[in-house]
Amino acid sequence: MVPRRADCFQDRAEIERLRRALADGGSAVVSQVLAGMGGVGKTQLAADYARHAQESGAVDVLVWITAGDRATVVSGYAQAGVEVLGADPADPQAAAREFLAWLEPKAGAKPCRWLVVLDDVADPADLAGWWPPASPHGCSLVTTRRRDAALTGNGRHLIEVGLFSRSEAVAYLADVLAAHGRAEPAEELGALADALGCLPLALSQAAAYIKDAHLACVDYRTLLADRATTFAYAVPDVLPDDQTVTIAAAWSLSIDRADTLRPVGLARPMLYLAALLDANGIPGAVLTGEPALAYLTAHRAAVDGEGDPPERGPVTHRDAVGALRALHRLHLIDHTPDSLHKTVRIHQLVQRAASDTLAPHQRDQTARTAADALLAAWPAIERDTALAQALRANTTALTAYAEDALHRPDAHEVLYSTGKSLGGSGQVAAAVGYFQHLTDTLRHHLGPDHAHTLIARQNVAYWQGEAGDADGAAAAFADLLEDYLRVLGEDHPDTLAVRHHLARWRGEAGDADGAAAAFADLLEDYLHVLGEDHPYTLSGRLNLAYCRRHTGDADGAAAAFADLLEDDLRLLGEDHPFTLVTRAHVAYGRGQAGDADGAAAAFADLLEGYLRVLGEDHPDTLGTRANVAYWRGKAGDADGAAAAFADLLEDYLRVLGEDHPNTLIIGHHLAWWQGHAGEDPVAVV
């Protein structure tokens, strides 16, 4: 019984690939394995090929077996033996063996062209000893969700069946709705295809639901987006195309099977973690770090009936990787260990189906664990910009799935890491918007005077200043200071920190004398409350020295920076970011004092430290390269400065984009030094 052709069946590239692969007229066995996640249309592709072979007269014997387990495989062969050979039905094993032996090529015998289809193989072990034989006259076709090594070799070839392309998905939706007198704009069909991840089975069941409920595509997308409604609710009462299971039920079977694979009982809780993160790529370190291991240890599933009994004791890194491989083997995820930043990819509907099975308290707990896992994987210093981007994307996805959980009982630290990472990567305007949204959310959840709400407001003001609005930042910190004095008091370290920021942005806004006076007063309080070696005290000294420079006391500022550098090296070490900043001020002071060669050399030495500590794409590293180029030009090498700024501009455009203020500044420097070098300045930004 070959399954009937689905309504509005779409011709796909896989059909031609399959026909070419099976059209082998040589002596080698032709055996193809169609592998893919549940719902991609493997059975329909196999059925299309089987019908084509039968209708074109390409085969004499066609056997179709739904191969859910070993017993059904043996039963299918036995039935074929009875019908083709007249084998004894009372002994299925013997009848099955007799049929497989008959498929073997025999010298001098009239060749029989055959095709055996083993559909939906659940476990490759079920086929051990039951694969169709090698024959120049026959071929076999297997469909499965598995991708174990045992499925390939011995002349068998794997064909990965993927999702519909977006154009195929839109064409399918248009055809199936048109068959019922419905038409939707192409953009709405595309939006629905995107929402369903172009998964054929999901598209089929969604189209049936839309027809039955007489909904528009936009209404179905609204239903799908409603997290209060499980995905299982968004399927029709009667499934189309003789389908027997919903998408959610199909994947539930795959999850059950994955949980029986070694390490037993870990696939399901691992999938729950992945279900709340970024479908487009999760760094491997997030799912194999200590928070993830502790979660897996606590939630190892008890699997009854199949597989080895669950191991006892803490889950190890190797166990966690094994759980990812088990999910990969069932096509529930794509696990590519060589891709460090996007090690795990997962279909958005697999995520939805998995997370829908969690009770609210389980989902909240899993979300907090996922946040812990992201934070543990987040480096203190972001050298790897691609990793930082991946971590931000995963935090964004987690927040979209379970934002409330990340604010109970208080705001999770990973929420602040994301915003700071945005700003630190040069996306300062995005950081302002991010922290403003976080502030509004925290006001709602925790109240206006909660410490986390106040910290979020600090970040809004800080990145507002970094975005170029020094006056706005100073005004915001002035307002914030009143609340800190009221809530925490004048000697609280956070209150002192707000005074620090207020003084800094007053200076940036043009009030250098007022900033210098404010930092002088603040430094006394730092020394009194925190002591001379506290990082806040060191920062206060740096800013006071900076203000002295801008009020005309260059010598006093140079001496203060030199003293501060000694203490930074003693307390923080040479690679601490704060030490690097102080070294930059010392180097700048040398240039300001007339020693351009010394400044260029000092910044060149400092650049090595930034490259080592922060990496080549960090904004501070790029800024240090700009200082090297600038002082090189001031020392008389205009050609070298112009060439350095030309190279630097390419990196600014790549890392920060053409509209970033610092990119524009580098463009102006390039034009200026090109003019001094005798070149014609060009429009660079």
Image: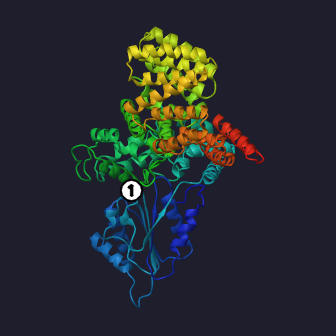
Residue at (50% x, 23% y) in the render: 456
Locate residue 531 relative to residue 644 in the image: left or right.
Answer: left
Can I make out residue 182 in this image? no
Residue 410 position in % (x across, y down)? 41, 23
Residue at (64% x, 50% y) in the render: 179
Bin the neighbour count of mark 1 within 10 Å (Cα to Cα): few under 14, some 14-19, many 20 and up.
many
Q: Is residue 4 above or below residue 432?
A: below
Locate residue 378 relative to residue 240 in the image: left or right.
Answer: left
Residue 471 position in % (x across, y down)? 63, 19
Figure quadrant of residue 16: bottom right
Depth order, front residue of 296/662? 662
Q: What amino acid is at disc 1?
A: Arg
Figure quadrant of residue 367: top left
Depth order, front residue of 411/632? 632
- Kind of element beneath mark 1: helix
Locate residue 204 relative to residue 252 in the image: left or right.
Answer: right
Can I make out residue 592 in this image? yes
Model colouring: rainbow
Residue at (55% x, 25% y) in the render: 555
Locate residue 315 relative to residue 285 in the image: left or right.
Answer: left
Q: Which residue is mark 1?
A: 329
Residue 584 position in % (x across, y down)? 53, 34
Depth order, front residue of 427/664? 664
Q: Is residue 192 above or below residue 58?
A: above
Figure quadrant of residue 221: top right
Residue at (55% x, 43% y) in the render: 601
Image quarter of the C terminus: top right
Return the residue found at the far top. 486
